[in-house]
Amino acid sequence: MASQQCDKQREEIFRLFDEKPGSGLGFLGFPEPSLPPPPPCLEVLPSEVSPNIRNNNTVETVDVGGLTLLKGRASTQEVFSLANSDLVPGKYEGGLKLWEGSLDLITSLKSELQHGKLSFDGKRVLELGCGHGLPGIFACLKGAVAVHFQDFNVEVLRCLTIPNVLANVQRKPVEGGQINTNTRFFAGDWNEVHSVITSGSKTENDDRNPESNQIDGYDIILMAETVYSMSALPNLYNLIMKCLRNPKGAVYMAAKKYYFGVGGGSRRFLSLVEKDGILAYSLVAEVADGSSNVREVWKLHFK
Ligand SMILES: C[S@@+](CC[C@H](N)C(=O)[O-])C[C@H]1O[C@@H](n2cnc3c(N)ncnc32)[C@H](O)[C@@H]1O
């Protein structure tokens, strides 16, 4: 059933990202769409979970290489009154759907853990463009001390991310007790969401010293399928540079090598990283399943 769902999602993804240039999404000389003003940036509390979701317990399972995670389901029709749609630039950015990159990312994180190349123990983690938030949830399950989730749309956090975190993490006993990761949820555009994220990301020391204005960074930033839009790449990169703990922080990014029709992709993003010259990057995994749209997972860290 999970594999049928994945096949269906794969078809949907290709419908969106195999569109030819000229689809009006602003690539190679085609005019950028004029976007509506971005939604306000705000922190969403777990208690603000959508009442519709609270009363509707539709939970599905997702198998990621033997690890079973739970996810809810919400349609663009019920949440945004939009006909079934992958994304509507500037209004809804795709967070209600589970994209295959987030599963690639978890698979890579599992492998990094198994090979001793990564540990979440005691780490502060930020998942950007989280949607369902499964990679961030994975970090909670693997010992992160704090996991903060960001999505463009407040509705996605209320209808999916928060319920998913509750279903997978907060009700799950683990060896040695309950998981008590600090989880927080931030909505807003990458261009400005930094203001709310950083006010929510001060060190635990700040509780002891309310005078302190010090902003602490994240040890690990996770993101899947976030680099599709050319115009959003600089804002995303700037946000990462503001949030990543220097010098030991690392970013794990899952993305398609190239998003047909919209112009972004892992390589576009990395060329921006390269130009700035501050982060180094290495390929963690490549998923080439015979289609032309190769998927990749990259690790970025300070040089
Ligand atoms: C294609 S969805 C991927 C969702 C999820 N990571 C996954 O792989 O299933 C892209 C995500 O990036 C976020 N996003 C896209 N553009 C954004 C922007 N300009 N500002 C903030 N978030 C944005 C959206 O919230 C959305 O959840």
Image: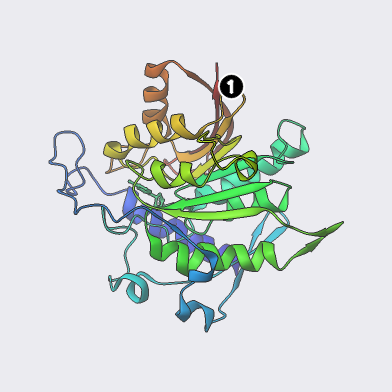
Q: Quadrant of the N terminus?
A: bottom right
- In the rendered image, the vertical position of residue 164 relative to residue 217, given as above or below: below
Towards the viewer: 281 or 208: 208
Furthest toward the right, the residue is 176
On the image, the x and y values in percent for residue 142 come to: 73, 48
On the image, the x and y values in percent for residue 235 come to: 33, 36
Find residue 115 and report its image quarter: top right
| Residue at the image point whose x is 56% and y is 43% from the top | 210
Q: Viewed as shown, does residue 210 lie left or right of 74?
A: right
- In the rendered image, the vertical position of residue 158 relative to residue 215, given as above or below: below
On the image, the x and y values in percent for residue 222 come to: 54, 42
Furthest toward the front, the residue is 211
Does mark 1 have its CB less than 8 Å from ligand 1? no
Q: Viewed as shown, does residue 166 lie left or right of 56?
A: right
Residue 175 visible in the shown view: no
On the image, the x and y values in percent for residue 57 come to: 57, 80
| Residue at the image point whose x is 39% and y is 40% from the top | 227
Towards the viewer: 88 or 258: 88
Residue 280 visible in the shown view: yes
Which amino acid type corresponds to the residue marked 1 in the rendered image?
Pro
Q: Viewed as shown, does residue 121 lie left or right of 80?
A: right
Q: Quadrant of the C terminus?
A: top right
Find residue 230 and report its image quarter: top left
Mark 1 neighbour density, 10 Å: few (under 14) some (14–19) many (20 or more)? few
Towards the viewer: 63 or 74: 74
| Residue at the image point whose x is 27% and y is 49% from the top | 19
Find residue 105 and report its image quarter: top right
Disc 1: which residue: 247
Towards the viewer: 225 or 239: 239
Give the SS element for disc 1. Answer: loop
| Residue at the image point whose x is 36% and y is 72% from the top | 79
